[in-house]
Structures are given as structure tokens and as C-alpha cells.
Image: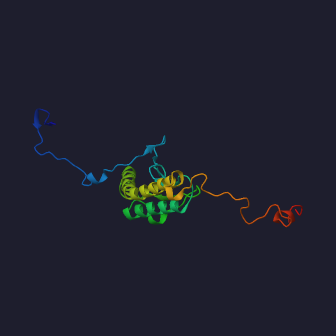
Amino acid sequence: MTVKVKINDKVEVDIKPTVKVTIKPSNMADLQTSLVLREAINGDYMIFGHSDIDIIILKEQSKIVAFAKDLITESVYGAETRMFNFLKKRGVVAYDSVQGGNVYGSLEGKLLDGTKTEKHSVFEALKALGDWMKEEEPYIKSTETYDDMMDDYLLDPNDEDTTELGEVPHEERKGSLMQRNLFAPYLYGRYTY
């Protein structure tokens, strides 16, 4: 890039820069993370990778909302609480802003913006959520493994927990309630309703 300077409208002097300056953010490596997300029509970011909750970053309102995925259980509230505690410790969400949302079972918190731009606070939130999702991977894998183990136990039991058809002896009278007796328990309450 050359700069032309006119002096007294008669002499042109070409000045070439001798020093090159490159400005890189010092934390550029820290801003890289991997996170599977979708972008809504209005620009909000939606994260559906957790097994218990869905996370939405509302850019217009500058807040993060966590919703229950299917059922509202203690594990949903636990995941929401762990996420917002992580975000508070990272300085992404204001401590006094975490509260229940207008949807049953949801929690929301306001993003901190400070002196940085709104866009930067959203990227910091995405980076923090990516780090939190990495921390949650063992929990998600263990719950999926447990669910698979229970499905296998019920659908394909081992030899100890099964009986062949015919091994169970059939008897004429089973149970404690006699049905063909004069004092059968069903006779007394038959017409008393």
C-alpha cells in the first residue's frame, strides 16, 4: 500500500510503509470449540445434543434458556442447574438473573455483555456451552449405556432369569382366593354396590 502526499500542490512524494503490524486476538485459540447447533430463522442458536435438555440462545433478548426435552424429572432440573452453574462460574451469565422461565420446567439466565460487543458475548456463550457439553459427555454416555442395559435385560434375559414353557407346574388350584366355594370372597360383595 502506497501513500501519496502532495506538498504545495507541486511535488508528489511516495511513502511506503516499512513496518507491518498484524493484530491477532490473544484468545483466538480459546474461542475454538466444537458444538452441534442449529440456527433459527430469527438468528437464535438451538442446541439439541444433550439427552435431557434443549438449549436456546436468544440473541435479541441476550439470554440463554434451557427446556426439558421430553419429561420433567429431577435429571432435567439437575442438568439445567449444572449448566447454569457452569455458565455463572465462566462469567457468561449474570448470577442474579437465573430464574424459572415462562415455560414449565425451563430455566433462563441473562448473558453478560460488559464492555464487549453483543456478538462477542454470544460467541463466548457458545464456547462455554461447548465446554460444558464436553464435561457432560460421560453423564450422557452412562445414562444411554444404562438404558441399553435395561432394554437388554428385559428383551433378551440370560438363562438364570428365564424359564422354558412347560417348566412351571400347572395346578388345579392356584392362589389364595377360592372361586368355587360357598364362602368365596366375591360372593359377599357382588350386589352391594
- Front-most of residues 55 and 163: 163
Residue at position x 55%, y 60% from top? Answer: 73
Measuring from the top left, give residue 65's x and y in whole percent: 50, 55
- Front-most of residues 76 and 138: 138
Q: Quadrant of residue 190?
A: bottom right
Image quarter hosting the C terminus: bottom right
Residue 113 visible in this rendered orientation of the protein = no
The correct choice, above or below, for 47 with respect to 12 in the image is below
Measuring from the top left, give residue 57's x and y in whole percent: 46, 51
Q: Count the labels in the image.
A: 0
Please give left or right for residue 101 compared with residue 131 in the image: right
Measuring from the top left, give residue 121's x and y in whole percent: 38, 54
**Farthest-out residue, right:** 191
Residue at position x 51%, y 61% from top? Answer: 75
Q: Quadrant of residue 15?
A: top left
Measuring from the top left, give residue 49's x and y in whole percent: 44, 50
Please give left or right for residue 169 compared with residue 63 in the image: right
Q: Quadrant of residue 125?
A: bottom left
The correct choice, above or below, for 72 with respect to 46 in the image is below
Residue 74 visible in this rendered orientation of the protein = yes
Image quarter hosting the N terminus: top left
Q: How is the image coloured?
A: rainbow
